[in-house]
Amino acid sequence: MGRLFAVVVTVIALVSAAIFALHVWWLPPDISAHGSRIDRQLNETMVTAGILFVAAQLALGLFVWRFDVRDGMPPRAVKTFPGGVTPLVVLAILFVGIEILVLTFVGSKVWASVYQTPAPAEALQIEVEAEQFAFYFRYAGPDGKFGTMHPDLMNDATQNFFGLDPANDTTARDDIVVGTLVIPVNQPIDLRLHAKDVNHSFYVPELRIQQDFVPGMVIPLHFTATQTGKYELVCTQLCGLGHYNMRAYIEVKTPADFAQWLKAQAATS
Amino acid sequence: MIARFSALVALVALASGTTPREPHRPAGGTISGKVTFTGTPPKAKPIDMSKEPNCVTQHPTPVTTEDAVTGPGNSVRYVVVYIAAGDQGAAPATDTVRYDQKGCQYIPHVAAMQVHQPLTIYNDDPHSHNIHPLARVNAEWNKSQPKGAPPIRTAWDEPEFIALKCNVHPWMHGYFAVLSTPHFAVTDSSGAFSLSGLPPGKYTVTAWHERFGTQSLEVTIAGSETKPANFVLTARPY
């Protein structure tokens, strides 16, 4: 029975490692300027953790195979780790702890290079408003200025998702508010994330971007998309009953198509 | 003696309340007219339903907001016109009001009903909706209706204009106009309405619109005549 367990453990370890190593379940192709850094970091983490995982599981299988006690065999003396259990546990904690610290240190450098750097000056500014259970996007319109947000004026019934006051605020009148994030390819995009009610999250796997919305905070987020196409933006913070349904689409267009789209939107807003 | 006479009148009124209504050709006078606007109404805004692909395919041309639907000749749709004063205890409305959630829209956008009138709410879409009447005078509730769920059968106890929203689809909005009178109408796409079956008397007719406010007119009905009542509401672009 012990030998069967050893075989099962070994097979599970090798099959699950192969699934990741062969990228059977993997992220969709990267379409962002910064994504290669995230992917490299993810690979390093998976390789490091994977080697340790496979080594530990193979050792477990080997020991179970080698020291299996079958019916009729005389009991064996158990050899203990030199010094007993305490140095074994301390060594294991140190070994795993150092690995995690190294991965965190290297990973946080990559994370900071994406999330803690300012957006380039030429970035296109777009406001994002997340609410139960949809995302809305606002462009400044032909005047290049965003109207001021007044939370008390937010009204879904009139599609005033950003609480604009066009009656008194002339900069708000040409603001373009849509339910799909349309952006030009190869141009830096500078988002400002607002949450109307509870925590939400902005997750686009293809863009290698995931950032929470927090009510009361305006959170900057910037990226550059490098391929045209239509991608899904999903909320990854459990935000209520309709969380499963909270999504929007991102359309990455050529600069000419984007300009045309923006012009058409300005005409109807 | 007066008390006994009042009781008799009340008894007669009660008895007449149980007689079936004639929805098509009720006896009495009629008040009919049209609701129009002056000023500049807000632009109808296109609604992006892309997060619900079922609803996108149900609308070959994009749906627009319905909070201010205007038509030729400055007509205004979805105005509730009702007898606000002068009602003489007519038989209560007992027919069931049907309200639909279809293509991620509330159909009709505005439904008028009398207090205690049966209301049945259907989900005709192949996905969930969560209707949430934002009642302030009546008890507020919200109910989820997954695909194929049975209709919600309910009624309202107090007169109130109740805004509706869907907790899953933020763009879905509508109104329940719950009235104490059985004499009410919602204007059609030409802004027209008709209130019939009115016994002789002096009436206050009120028009209510969710963005353009309310307006009232006094109309006196002498017999089985049709009296006009036209409302001109003030529209603002924002």
Image (spheres, grey):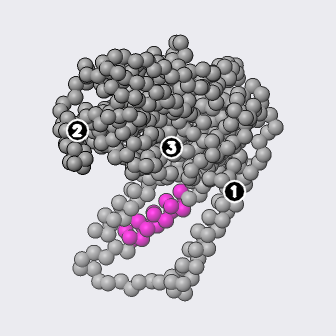
In the rendered image of this protein, does residue A115 appear above or below residue A255?
Answer: below
Q: Mark 1 lies on which chain?
A: A
Q: Distance between the residues labelled 3 and 1?
A: 31 Å
| Marks 2/1: CA–CA distance | 80 Å
Percent position (x, y) of residue A70? Answer: 27, 75
Q: Main secondary structure of the magenta part?
A: helix
Q: Is residue A134 left or right of residue A269?
A: left
Q: Give the range drawn in magenta.
A: A50-66
- Single out the mark in the foreground, 3 or 2: 2
Which SS class for mark 1? helix
Asked where in the image residue A58 lies, by quadrant, the reply is bottom left
Residue tagged by mark 2?
Answer: B13
Instruction: Say yes or no: labels 3 and 2 on the same chain.
Output: no
Quadrant in which residue A105 is drawn? bottom right
Give the numbered dot on residue A108: 1
* Residue A183: % across, % down: 66, 30
Amino acid at the residue labelled 1: Ser
